[in-house]
Amino acid sequence: MNRQHQILFTCREKEHVVKLLEHYDLPFVILGKIPESIQGKVSSILKFGYGIYKVAYRFKPDLFLSHGSHYAAHVAFVTGKPHIAFEDTFNFEQIWLYKPFTKAILTGDYEHPLKSSKVVRYSGCHELAYLHPNRYKPDISVLDEMGISVNEKYVILRFSSWKASHDYGHKGMNFNNKLEAVKQFSQYAKVFISSESELPPILQTYKINIAPFRIHDALAYASLILADSFTMPSESTVLGTPAVIIHNNRSLCLEEQSEKYRLCYIFSESENDQQEAIKKGLELLKKENIKTDWNKRRNKMLKDKIDVTSMLIWFIENWPESFYIMQENPDYQERFR
């Protein structure tokens, strides 16, 4: 937008999305609420697709950009415009729907199962598009807002609602273990909970009460995050905060963060693993100077990565030549470090 390009967001009503768009003064159109039933999700392919088509008819974009949206991909195809997808979850029920109608799929360069001539790999991860040090500086005043003193330890627990299409068959952390995590962690740190769904009365006092746009500040200064989802742990690792993840699915980005940079720990949703995850969280909380150690690990990771936003701006402004440059010479991205 600063370079005089016109941008328009379409969104569905989901936790905090509209509030964030309003806070950052970004132009947007709301397409409606996300249905919870399988039938609703199937019918929404037409509903949201038609909604984007009406918006595109008026706005007349040159490009469609999305985080793997099959709605955007289908409308781009119908209107004869290119669709570029940013992919990091590798949920193939979505990929199968958008891939045939997409010109380029941008992914991190970690090992993943998406094999296609449309894939462009870059040295980074999705979260570095907005949390790279060139793009984001944490604001320590969030501690005052949270009632935390400097050097006081605090933990953020993040619980998913498990209502997305790729969440079927998952239960996440059970209620008893959520209570146990709060009880155990409270011995060593203040506990805050961020939850997609409404918290039961017994956990309401732990609900984190800050503006949505401040959550990354809170993550940056936390001593630990424990989550049964992927996004906030991914954000935490690139911010230098230890993360413990409970999930049956694989997050290939987080696996790299775990195995190569030792920034997080991953457990399954089994009862035994949930308890082991709590034990790992306690072990991390008891360590002295853990943030210093994690920042060293984070800096090692950052040395291997590019400023993703700089690369994306170049890629979009120079489309389609940029696609062929990256395909023929992937090292071209080195200039974006």
Image (cartoon, rainbow, N blue to C red):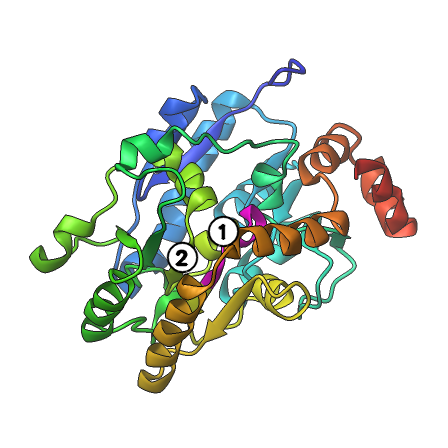
Residue type (three-letter) at the residue carrying disc 2: Ile
Task: Say which residue appears at 65% left-offset and 52% top-offset.
Answer: 296
- Is 135 located above or below residue 181 in the figure? above
Residue at 50% across / 33% down in the picture? 138
Is residue 269 visible to the viewer in this orientation of the structure?
yes
Quadrant containing the C terminus is: top right
315 or 265, which lies in front?
Answer: 265
Callout 1–callout 2 Cβ contact below 8 Å: yes
Where does the image place residue 248, in percent across and percent down from the top left? 43, 76
How many C-alpha atoms fall within 10 Å of the one at disc 2: few (<14), some, or many (≥20)? Answer: many
Quarter-of-image position of residue 29: top left
The stretch of residues the image draws in magenta is: 236-243
Residue 113 is left or right of residue 162, and the answer is: right
N-terminal label among 1 and 2: 2
* Element under disc 1: helix
Estimate the x, y position of residue 15 in percent, counting from the top left.
Answer: 30, 43
Name the outermost residue toward the right. 328
| Residue wearing tag 1 | 236
Q: Is residue 28 magenta?
A: no
User: Residue under circle 2?
Assistant: 225
Relative to 140, is 295 above or below?
A: below
